[in-house]
Image: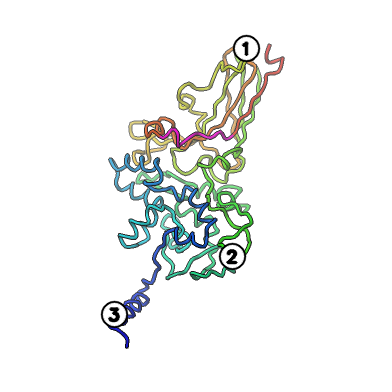
Amino acid sequence: MVSVWSKVVFVLLMMAVINGTNAQEVQSFRSCADCHRQITHEWQQSRHAQSTERTNPFFAAMVKWARSSSAEDVEKCKKCHQPVSALGLNEYDSRTLAVEGVTCDVCHATRMKGNGKDAWFELLPTNVKQGPSKDAVPVSHSAEFSSVLTSPQFCQTCHGNMEKSHQFDICSTEEEYHKSSFARKGVTCQDCHMPAMEGKSADLGKIRNINSHIFYGGYNAEILRNCANVKITLEKNSSALRAAVEVTNRTVGHSLPTGSPLRMVVLTVQALDENDQVLWQNFGDSPFEDSKSVFMRLLQNDSGAAPVPPWEATSIKFDQRLSPDESRTLVFDIPVPHVKQVQATLTYFPAPATLISKFGLEARLQPTIIASTIQTLSQELSE
């Protein structure tokens, strides 16, 4: 005999299907790890897993700072840093799973809806996961192939264009990419940031090319090193040694840097004596003393103070980032004698050093040298 409660459950399930609310419950990454151990291990090392206030000290410090002036902007940030909260879950699941950041189901249990800046994710029907393979035969859920999941469009839902109320771009990675030779050649975000190698996506799966889930980016030295070149040409004029330093964006399919406007790449030029001691440098304590050597989108407020965080910004003071494939030459006159060598170093900073110091995160947010070269003066130039 069928119990009353069984009938109630059946009716509720039918109502959910009829009303289109049969979306699945978002699962913790721990459920996925039972079968997808290698991919889960990679994801745990990624910034996707470390994107929340609890797991990312820099984001936590920025949120605390922002709350004092702009609660609305905090919620905008959390939408991508803690996207589970924006998937329409009940309060308990939303709060419990938000700490996992960009967890597995955010990408694999959703599909895109809307276009452009209005694009966002909606949950797939119960127990359906999407992936890049057409022949997957999972044992614990249904599978659905998604061409969108392997496209730049999917990544650009969060890593695309972000605007503030002042109607200027805070982040324009999508636009930068589409203007590049990388887009024209069909090179996708995943090709660089999720490189593929032979392996298994699940313990019982077949061997195939599997995309890395470390999500390489600005926090990974492996992808930063040699993404740009520096080249020095030396000559002498009547008053000083002149160094022309050519900087080239080699392998980046968007501006260098991109994303957060606090990111910066700095060119340091030094003149050295015969004992490798520094005789001259293009700036002192702050790289902004030689602003042409700072590659970033610098935001300012109404008073002209810069850099400022996005929620305080009212305009862009300058945007000197390197476009994809761009080469730019900067000229430096070195007004000191006894120079034997000139060195040029390109360094990536996740944020200005003063801000990192303010948050006490110097040990966690180290700069990364992208490229460096040194040129010895010829005998003619040394005279």
Residue 348 spot, x, y in % from top left: 52, 35
Q: How is the image coloured?
A: rainbow
Distance, label 2 to label 3, CA atoms, is: 39 Å
Are there few (<14), some (14-19), or many (20+) residues within 10 Å of tag 2?
some
Which quadrant holds residue 13?
bottom left
Q: Which residue sits furthest right?
A: 379
Residue 334 spot, x, y in % from top left: 58, 17
Tag 1 residue: 338
Residue 278 in sight: yes
Q: What residue type is labelled 1?
A: His
Tag 2 residue: 205
Tag 3 residue: 5
Q: Which amino acid does label 2 sit on?
A: Gly
In this orientation, which residue lies closer to the viewer: 122 or 241?
A: 122
First-in-chain label (2 vs 3): 3
Provide the residue span drawn in magenta. Answer: 361-370
Residue 79 spot, x, y in % from top left: 38, 53
First-in-chain label (1 vs 2): 2
> SS for tag 3?
helix
Name the residue rendered at 34%, 38% in the picture: 312
Q: Which amino acid does label 3 sit on?
A: Trp
For the N terminus, the image quarter is: bottom left
For the C terminus, the image quarter is: top right
